[in-house]
Image (tube, grey):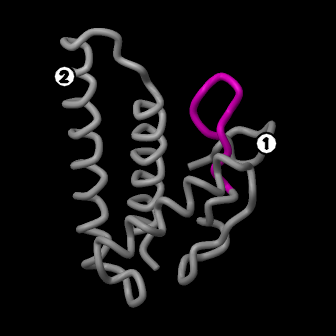
Amino acid sequence: MSSRILEAWHQLDEQVDEIVSVGQGDPVTDEDSAAWTQHLNVLKARARGKAEILALLMPAPFDTADAISMEAGKRQAMRAAGRAYQTPGLPAESAAPGWYHAPGGGFTAEPGQARTS
């Protein structure tokens, strides 16, 4: 499997994490709410675009943007829970377990280690 496809999965992971982070926000004013909603919609559109591209490159069962999006949601839930998860069809070294939230933000390869790619 191409390293570019794996990188696209990781980029989608980062995009979904950002959506979740922004989605947990709480805009105070109507003006803030409109900007917040617009920002969230842009993030979702970017993630959907990544899913559409991955769907063109991935074999079944991940050959639709909806299937990619559902898998991205599973990967995010497992990362957020700190649980290991292997996306079927992706090499083990590219799996979601390699993506843990670092204490200061960003991601680490394993809890307490720096991410290498």
Spot occupied by residue 21 in the image (x, y as percentages of width and height): 48, 33
Q: Is residue 95 magenta?
A: no
Magenta stretch, overall SS: loop
User: Hey, which residue is sitting farthest right in the picture?
Assistant: 112
The mark lying in front, picked from 2 and 1, is 2
All told, the count of numbered labels is 2
The image quadrant that residue 67 belongs to is bottom left
**Label 2 amino acid?**
Ala
- Residue under circle 2? 34
Q: What is the span of residues highlighted in magenta in the rendered image?
A: 98-107
The image quadrant that residue 2 belongs to is bottom left
The one of 69 and 100 positioned closer to us in this rendering: 69
Is the residue marked by circle 1 packed among few (<14), some (14-19), or many (20+) residues within 10 Å?
Answer: some
Q: Is residue 99 magenta?
A: yes
The image quadrant that residue 65 belongs to is bottom left
- Residue under circle 1? 111
User: Hey, which residue is sitting farthest bottom in the picture?
Assistant: 60
Secondary structure beneath dot 1 equals loop
Spot occupied by residue 75 in the image (x, y as percentages of width and height): 56, 60
Q: Earlier in the sequence, mark 2 or mark 1?
A: 2
Secondary structure beneath dot 2 equals helix
Residue 88: numbered disc: none
Spot occupied by residue 29 in the image (x, y as percentages of width and height): 27, 9
> Marks 2/1: CA distance?
37 Å
